[in-house]
Image: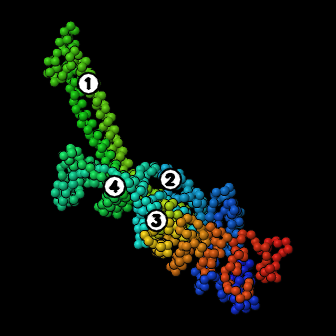
């Protein structure tokens, strides 16, 4: 066989010489050593989309795989011309720590001797599920976990430098959980996306404390919050007028204080000056019922009115869950401040009484010392106290009564001290927390970008130190939709772009690079991995339309699928591709062409748009056919230099597909010119290459 070439002297391996293939009578000239110009393929594709030399294979290590020496050798026997090394640490003796220099050299030399290129390294998925440190809702974001996972990525970078000539370091995303139906990408012309049917009505959005990484609050779609209704400029007929103190032009819903002056909503101290509306008929202050839609509108209003501040710092943009938390927190702070004020007012009263009693005590203690004991009963007369404005109970000495009252006032003062100061402390704590409670998305993105930036800078240094032919680049992969942020193409684009921006800024700030050089390096060392099947699993989250047939649904989803591929290519982020197929519901990892996803169309589009990076088949679901069927799906031709198996029969892939394809052991027969015939074998059945 001759793979991908039109001449008689080009072979994928020695086993390809004079292997039986075509069965058309007009190609009988092949028996005389003439090349045959007809590919074997179920569909007659005039030009192959990808050739066998362009489609490689991902191999792993561990039980059933052996070491990379074993799995790479097996891939070579299948005909792979490029290989990705997927690190696994599930079994003893696996992972980059167990490969000595000699073993690393053997891997390199085996690949070189067989003209196979090791193009990438996949970080162990069992150890690295994200780079944000997210350990689940209960644990939140754990810095120790983020550090450990980043260290695994760096080990993979070092391993790649010692085995490959550069290429992708593939990292699974899944940085944090988010509500699918609330994302900007959840509604498009192609349809609506939900995590589950009732998600829009039942979801929970979480918030995290950026000081600890702990998830501290949640905002439920079904939750209702009440807050006071405050007097506004509209209530006082001040809309359009200017506040003489601040120069602010009143808008309809601007808050006012008791002097009808503007209350700046960004000034936390001024919020305490808002005036709640009094309902005289019900003799209480009015409140309003807030649902999730109200928080969405309040967040939109905040962002609209603070565009300048947001432009300076995008993190100032308010999310609905942050607005929910802020609304609740502001109400709590005001309650604490009100309690403090109430106690403070009583404090002044208690202090005045105590001072009055202390003054009276001095007078009556002197008087009691001057009055003989037998006449002291006269001091119990009320008229003596009338001059001090103090009411004296009967049958008690003035000094005894005053001491008791002084103690009572001091006890009340101490209670006021504690209650008021405690209320103020709680109010201050609420305000402090308010500055640090963020949506999970804001916190996690910062953590992820920090980790990816660190990994990219390390990849840049290692690439230079090892003088690699190609740059080592960090390649976040779109993982399964339910695993979180990074799985949707929009999120993957954002993650790559944020990392590139941060890397460029650090290169300029810390290494003195020019903007052009820094951006060039950042773009070269951060590129995404597109997994064609993972993209297709969004199919199960696509909402079906009433009366829609299966074909209509498939057509609509495929339109969305291709739109996402186009979007990622236009964003210039794709640098690595995993080819796999499936049925759009679970991670089947089938060879291309054996599922229902538009994998071939996507790759064909990318090739036309100039993509020139690696293609790795990840057809683990049918490992024996992961290369052969993928070659077949992309129109990869196989040419024969030998006559047909059955003269007169049609040309088909099945003539060769059950030969040595997919077998990890050497065949028990000799090929072509090395044997008298294709039926000849050793009597002992000893395998021969």
Indicate the position of residue 58 as horizontal and vertical percent values. Answer: 62, 68
Q: What element carries label 4?
A: loop
Task: Please tell me which of labels 4 and 2 falls first in the chain.
Answer: 2
Task: Please tell me whether residue 643 is drawn above or below residue 629 in the rendered image.
Answer: below
Nearest to the observer: residue 55 or residue 218: 218
**Front label number (3 vs 1):** 3
The quadrant the N terminus occupies is bottom right
Image coordinates for residue 623, horizontal then vertical, percent: 65, 68
The first of marks 3 and 2 along the sequence is 2
The residue pinned by badge 1 equals: 406
Residue designated by label 3: 491
Q: What separation in Å lies between label 4 and label 2 (alpha carbons)?
A: 27 Å
Answer left or right for 292 relative to 251: right
User: Can residue 67 be seen at all in this image of the molecule?
Assistant: no
Q: State the residue at coordinates (41%, 68%).
A: 187
Task: Tell me which residue sits at (59%, 79%) in the image.
Answer: 634
Coloring scheme of the render?
Answer: rainbow
The residue tagged 4 is 291
Nearer-N-terminus badge (1/4) = 4
678 left or right of 5 in image: right
SS type, badge 3? helix
Q: Dot 4, crowdedness within 10 Å: few (<14), some or many (≥20)?
A: some
The answer to whether 41 appears left or right of 255 in the picture is right
Q: Identify which residue, 390 or 183, lies in the foreground.
A: 183
Q: Badges 3 and 1: C-beta atoms under 8 Å apart?
A: no
- Viewer-nearest residue: 642 or 462: 642
Image height check: is 350 above or below 396? below
Query: Label 2, on which residue?
Result: 136
Mark 3 or mark 2: which is in front? 2
């Amino acid at each position: 066989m001759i793979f991908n070439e039109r001449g008689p002297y080009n072979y994928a391996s020695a086993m390809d010489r004079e292997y039986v293939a075509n069965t058309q009578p007009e190609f009988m000239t092949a028996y005389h050593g003439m090349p045959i110009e007809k590919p074997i393929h179920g569909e007659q594709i005039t030009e192959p989309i990808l050739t066998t030399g362009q489609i490689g294979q991902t191999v792993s290590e561990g039980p059933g795989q052996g070491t990379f020496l074993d799995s790479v050798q097996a891939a070579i026997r299948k005909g792979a011309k490029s290989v990705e090394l997927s690190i696994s640490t599930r079994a003893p003796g696996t992972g980059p720590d167990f490969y000595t220099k000699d073993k690393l050299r053997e891997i390199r030399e085996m690949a070189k001797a067989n003209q196979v290129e090791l193009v990438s390294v996949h970080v162990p998925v069992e150890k690295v599920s994200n780079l944000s440190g997210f350990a689940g809702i209960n644990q939140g974001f754990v810095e120790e976990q983020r550090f450990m996972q980043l260290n695994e990525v760096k080990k993979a970078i070092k391993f790649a430098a010692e085995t490959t000539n550069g290429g992708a370091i593939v990292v699974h995303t899944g940085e944090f959980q988010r509500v699918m139906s609330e994302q900007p990408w959840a509604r498009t012309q192609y349809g609506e996306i939900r995590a589950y049917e009732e998600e829009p009505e039942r979801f929970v959005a979480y918030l995290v404390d950026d000081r600890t990484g702990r998830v501290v609050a949640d905002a439920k779609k079904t939750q209702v919050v009440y807050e006071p209704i405050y007097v506004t400029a509209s209530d006082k007929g001040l809309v359009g007028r200017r506040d003489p103190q601040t120069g602010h032009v009143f808008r309809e819903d601007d808050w006012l204080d008791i002097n009808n002056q503007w209350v700046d909503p960004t000034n936390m101290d001024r919020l305490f000056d808002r005036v709640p509306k009094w309902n005289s008929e019900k003799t209480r202050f009015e409140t309003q019922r807030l649902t999730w839609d109200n928080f969405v509108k309040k967040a939109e209003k905040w962002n609209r009115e603070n565009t300048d501040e947001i432009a300076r710092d995008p993190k100032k943009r308010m999310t609905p869950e942050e607005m929910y938390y802020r609304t609740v927190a502001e109400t709590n702070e005001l309650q604490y401040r009100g309690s403090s004020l109430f106690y403070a007012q009583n404090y002044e009263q208690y202090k005045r009484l105590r001072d009055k009693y202390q003054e009276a005590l001095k007078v009556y203690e002197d008087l009691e010392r001057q009055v003989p004991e037998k006449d002291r009963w006269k001091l119990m007369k009320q008229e003596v106290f009338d001059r001090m404005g103090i009411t004296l109970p009967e049958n008690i000495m003035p000094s005894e009564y005053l001491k008791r009252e002084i103690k009572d006032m001091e006890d009340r003062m101490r209670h006021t001290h504690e209650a008021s100061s405690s209320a103020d402390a709680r109010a201050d704590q609420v305000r402090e927390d308010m500055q640090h409670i963020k949506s999970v998305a804001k916190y996690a993105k910062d953590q992820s970008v920090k980790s990816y930036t660190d990994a990219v800078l390390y990849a840049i240094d290692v690439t230079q130190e090892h003088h690699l032919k190609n740059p080592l680049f960090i390649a976040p992969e779109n993982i399964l939709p339910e695993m979180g942020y990074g799985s949707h193409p929009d999120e993957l684009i954002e993650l790559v772009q944020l990392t590139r921006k941060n890397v460029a800024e650090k290169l300029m700030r810390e290494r003195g690079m020019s903007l052009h050089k820094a951006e060039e390096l950042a773009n070269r060392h951060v590129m995404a991995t597109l997994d064609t099947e993972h993209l297709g699993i969004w199919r199960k989250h696509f909402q079906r339309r009433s009366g829609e047939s299966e074909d209509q649904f498939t057509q609509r989803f495929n339109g969305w699928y291709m739109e996402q591929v186009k979007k990622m290519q236009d964003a210039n982020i794709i640098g690595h591709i995993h080819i796999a197929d499936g049925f759009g519901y679970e991670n089947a990892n089938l060879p291309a062409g054996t599922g229902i996803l538009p994998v071939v169309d996507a790759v064909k589009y990318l090739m036309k748009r100039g993509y020139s990076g690696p293609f790795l088949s990840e057809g683990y679901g049918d490992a024996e056919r992961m290369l052969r069927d993928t070659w077949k799906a992309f129109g990869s031709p196989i040419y024969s230099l030998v006559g047909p198996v059955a003269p007169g029969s049609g040309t088909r892939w099945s003539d060769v597909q059950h030969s040595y394809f997919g077998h990890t052991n050497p065949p028990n027969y000799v090929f072509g010119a090395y044997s008298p015939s294709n039926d000849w074998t050793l009597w002992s059945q000893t395998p021969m290459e």
